[in-house]
Structure formats: C-alpha cells, structure tokens
Amino acid sequence: MTSVIGSRAVREDAWGKVFGQAKYPADVNLPGQIYGVVLRSPHPHARIRRLDVRKARELTGVAAVLTASDVPHNSHGVLFRDQPVLVSERIRMVGDPLVAVAAESPETAREAARLVEIEYELLPALFNPEEAMRPGAPALHPEVHGESNVLYHLPVVKGDLAKGWASADVVVEQDYSTQMVDHAFLQPEAVLAQVDERGHLVVQAATQYPHYDRGEIAHALGIKVSRVQVKTLSVGGSFGGREDISLQLVAALLAYRTLRPVKMENSREESFYSHCKRHPMTMHYKTGATREGKLVAMEARIVGDAGAYASWSPNILRKAAIHATGPYEIPNLRVDSYAVFTNNPWTGAMRGFGAAQPVLAYESQMELLAKKLKISPVEIRLRNMFRTGSTTATGQALTGSVGLEECLQKVAPFLWKEGDRE
Amino acid sequence: MKKRGTGLSCTWYGTGYGNGFPDVSSAFVEIHDDGTATVLTGAVDVGQGSSTVFAQIMAEELGLNPEDILVCSGDTDVTPDSGTTAATRQTYNTGNAVLKAVRQAKLRLQEFAARKFSCPSPEGIEFKEGMIGVRGDPSRSMPLSELVWEARLLHGERFISAASFTAQTTPVSLENGQGAPYWPYAFGCQAAEVEVDTETGTVRVLKIVAAHDLGRAVNLTQAEGQIAGGVAQGVGYALLEEVELTEGRIKNPAFAKYLIPTALDVPEIESMIVEEPEDTGPYGAKGLGEPAMLPTVAAIINAIDAAVGVRITALPATPEKILAALAEKERGGSGD
C-alpha cells in the first residue's frame, strides 16, 4: 500500500500564504514602472464614429495612449479569435476595451482616459437569446461567425422517442432557468509587463494557462513565442475566469511600445467587466417514466446566452447537452442545445462548464417524477442511475470507475423519510 | 414560521477538454545529488493544490517526503506546456505526466542500483523512506542520497526525463451527438438540510452532506477543501448570486450588491470521499475540482420544496421568489 498518496501532506505553498509572503501579481513592482488603465465602452452595441486621443496624449505624465491601430494583430480568443484587443470600429458589449493608457501614476492614467473623446453611433442591441436566434435578427459577428447569431447547436438523439413516450405512465414537463453569475475570485486581475535585458517581453500574471497567454501575446504583438515569457505568480482564485486572456495583452502592448515596465490592477468594478461570466441558461424539460419508476423518454431544449464573444460557448453548450440526462440511463431522448450571441457581457468557462446548469433541471425532474409515482427520491435514482456498464445519452459505455451508487448510499441516511417532518 | 426539510441531488461530470480535443500534459523531472528531485510542469496551482499533488506523486515514487520535492509551475521560460488548469484535469492529466516522467528517471536509477547490488532486474530495486535497495534484502540497500551522489559524480549518470500524457476522448457527431466525449467521469451526491422562514422567505442552509467519487484522493485535506469550496459556491449559486443586467450593463459590479456567501452563510459540511479507482488515473485518481460544486444547488432547491412545498425553477431562490411561490400556493396554484 502506498503512504504519501492519500495522506494529508501540507500544501507546499501553505507557509507563504499563512505568513502573507506569497506574491500575487498586485504585489510585484519594478523601479520606473508606469501604470496602465483601459477605457471601456459604456454602450452595448455601437460604432465608433470618431476617436480623438490628442488631449489625453498631451496631459503631463502620460506615456502612451494606444488604440486599435497600435495593435499589430488585433484579435484573441480561446476557440475563435473573434475578440479585439482594442475595438477598432464595432462595439459589441458594455466593457469592450477601446483605448489603453499608461502614465506615471494610476491617477494620471485615469485622468487621461477621461480626456479621450469618442463619438458613438448607437446600434439596436440584442439582450434576449431567443430574440437573437430568430432568423432576420441582426448578425453580431458576420465576419467570423456568419449571418446567424446561433454560434453552436448540438442535437443529442438516442433510441425511439415515440416508443418512449408511448411506454411512459407519467410525464413531467417544466421550464427552468439559471442566472448569470460571476466567478467573484477574491483577487482582481493584476499584471506586471516589461521588456527585459534580453529584449524579451516578460509578463507576470495570475492565469490558468500561461502557455496559452504566451501564444496570444505573441500573436497580437507579432513577435516570436520564444521572445515572450509568461510567469505565473500566486493566483487568488480563478474558477474559469482566468482562461480567456485579460489585462495581460494590454499590459504587454503598453510595455512593448513604451519600453517601460507597466503595472495594471483592476478595481472590483473593472474586474466584473474584464472577464467572462457563467452562461445563463433556459431549459425546457419533459421527462417520462414507467409505473415502476424507470425513465423511458426525455426531451430537452437548452439555450445558453453566449454574450458578445464566443469564448468557450460551443464547448459549454455541448457539455450541457451531453450531461442533460443527469447520471441516469434514458433509452429514448432528444436534446437540443444552443449557444447564442447577444450584446450582454460575454460568457465562458466557470467551474462546472455547462454541466452545472442542467443539474437544476434534471434533479428537479427526478423529484417531480418521484412524487407522481409515490416512490422515494432515493428509490427513483437507484432504479435509473449509472453503474459500470451503463450507456450514456451519447452512446458512451461507462467501462471504468462509476462510484455513484456508493455516493448515494452514503448520503441517503441523512435524508428525512415520510413522516420525519414535524 | 420556520420550517425544515431535506433534499437530494446526484450529479456526474466528464473531466478533461473532451470532444476529441488533444488533451495533453507534459512534465520534466530531474533527480539531484542528494536524492531530492525537481519536477517542472506548466500546470498552474490556482489554489486547488495541484503542486502539492505533484510533489506527493514524486515523493511516492522515490520514497521521499513531499517536502524533498521542488515543484516548479507555470513559467513558460522553463516549464513545458501542461494545458489549462480547468476541466478538472490537472491531478489526472498532469499527474499522469508527472508519474510517467518520474518513473523514467527512476528506471535509470534502478538500473544503476541493480548493477551495484548484483540484482538481475531493475524491477527488484525499491525506494523506501529515503533508502534504495533490493526488495526483501536489507543488506543490499543504502541511502538514496549516497547512491545518487555516487552515480552522478563518480559515474556521470544523469537522472532526467520528460514525458507527456494524453487523455482519451472522441468527438461527438454534430448530427446526433453520439460519441465518447469525455473520460473519466466523476460522480457525486449531496443532501441538504434547510430552514425556510415562511414570513421572510429566507432560506438558511443548515447542513450539507457530500459524497464524491474522485477515484482516489491523493491528498485528503485538499479533497475536503475542494468539497467545502464547492458547497460554498453552490450555496451562492442557489440562493444569493446574480449578475443583474439592464441593457447589457451590470447593475451590481461590487460585493456590496453582488452577494457571495460569507462564513455565516456556509453550512456545516460533512464530506465523504468515495474511492472507486480509475485504472487510467495516477494511483486510481480521477478529479474533484468542478464536481464538488455541482450537486449543491439542486439539493437545496429540493430541500426547500420538502420544507414548504414550493418548487423554485428559476435561480437564485431569493426570498422574493419564495414568498411569491408561497402566496401562489396559498391561492391554490400548483406548488409544483
């Protein structure tokens, strides 16, 4: 038997964190550093008619005021590069980055950002995915994603639904919805970027994937991957909110242009606008079972609001579809899952990644069915749950570790039974 | 009136990038003169504890303490690409890469030791509590530090290695969704006990009992930590948190108005680790990061129904929604 595995070994970073010595990106500084801020869009959908940065550039203490034309390759994104480093023309959401400013102090940088003059042409905006997916709705990403706002659709089809419904003795049908939430990590985004003595761009940040960040920085700035170093410092929570690249790109751009170390640190409010959110989803579920409590049919329609940019939306709505049955065998089913662009803040990875939202629906359906069938919540789950050898909605055979039944047996004694309620 | 009830929720979670996307992690290993070792991976420890997990894997293989291992993470100038810290994949994916790499370096050390101890096969060499020697023959063993020193400095041996691990996944069909998109799957069940105040509509979560099948817990304390964090996040998702939008603008971009659970909102948590070993995982491990937060929401929603007979179908279950549902039930509308 092994000994170190399964132990309670003390975290290797425990002492540094307990004594406050751990270094987060906000804690590192360099002599001569300047401070960067981003001017963001107040409008959800607009065209930039005129952008005048002259007054901002003239302010004493300002080192750089950069716009889209200063970005060599102005795009980034985890699946599609459909998100601008700085918007050149079309704004798709409140919070879209427009101008990057660096100055001798954060106050001067913010003052300069206020001096930027922008004229907007406001465009009608889409906030409701159901409206955005209708044919004829104005396309939000015609260049990258074509004329439809439906970024992704996955049907999952199995068995024979008509037969399934015919064999169902009870059916429950219900709409569910989940809200948009934020990762709310305790440490807002911060970054220190510099061009070092080798002429390499060195970016210190808190990220979930430094090698991805390195590639995005190299691409946006048009420099070689071997000339970019992304160094991860202590990370104050992430939960998916540090997967899309954030301030790292703008800080790298400012440092590369000014050849001075650039420090950026978000306020909480700025942080809310500079990372993705969890997808709100609407879920229509119809589930049927036999008198014996065996699930025989399910239909579900899931619509997720992708917001203004793709990020991980196709993968997330795919994951929602694949997990839509819950951990139960259902022989006949159809699930349709959609990711739809709107002018809301963009949504992306967050702990659970599309498998979190359907839980509300499938576990509520199980409860409603149990009530109709007058069997216990534990019993209906035992009669349908995945075990080794089960087949999922996508036809995958679960050949390995499936410890679900043991989990249920462990929590079941804590549930009150009929009559336990006062 | 305050009424109590319990609710159940069972969930599953496919780990890894999935859908056929190449899900690869890499690790570099070097064993030093004094028998200690370094492992380099691109995997960022975002607080979940992956660096400690890698130290434990290295220590387990080399018969050392985790403190003897230097884990260097997430620096693109020196560490290999180990993918995103996401998808509940670092213990499984990068853990497997570390295991593969350390076993390669270890094999060369075993070969050297086998020659030294006149043992016909390197498999007969074991590492135990800082010693290296022939299994079952204590007379043929010596401190690992002395053997590595001798091998490196007198014989010019080097114990370094690099390895990659790729998870198994196939894409699903865009016509009917059929395929084997993820592997492995993690499972979990939670039961919630709540107290609902029928006058104010507020819900207090009194207790969560959480059982999670993670294959194998590499670090028990960290596994319990993941469950506690997941439950706290689940309580926020079920009852408190919502980014409120008006025309795409966030109305509450501050913690004064965007409410996350505080210590007072987090219930008593009883966590139970279920270990159904996964053959392809390091020592049987799958993962726990995301699965830990999945069941909480529905367990709470089902417990609210058990307590007061109303079903909340739109998150979060705010006092306003609960009072409205109670009033509707009063008027004779369907509670469910």
Image: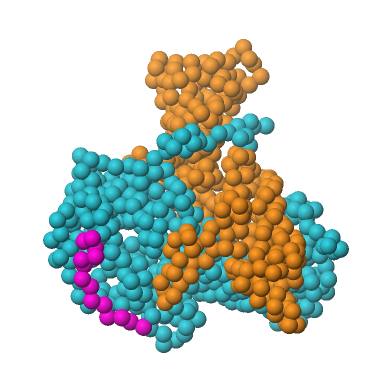
Chain colours: A cyan, B orange
B224 with respect to A354 (left or right): right
Report the side of B100 relative to B75 (left or right).
Answer: right
Q: Position of residue A196 (x, y in %)?
A: 22, 42
Q: Is residue A114 magenta?
A: yes
Residue B208 position (above or below residue A394): above
Give the residue displayed 17% in from the left and 66% down from the top.
A53
The C terminus of chain A is located in which quarter?
A: bottom right
Residue A245 or B326: which is nearer the viewer? B326
The residue at 57%/59% (across/down) is B236
Q: Position of residue A119 (x, y in %)?
A: 23, 76
Which region of the structure is painted magenta? A111-124
Residue drawn at (44%, 61%) of the image: B254
Q: Residue A276 sits in which quadrant?
A: bottom left
What is the x, y in percent for residue B274? 69, 47
Number of numbered labels in the structure image: 0
Q: Is residue A8 magenta?
A: no
Residue that extends furthest to the right in the rendered view of this protein: A419
A2 lies above or below A50? above
The N terminus of chain A - image quarter:
top right
Which residue lies at the image location 39% right of the left edge and 20% below the top edge? B156
- Look at the image and tell me whether residue B120 can be seen: no
Q: Residue furthest top?
A: B139
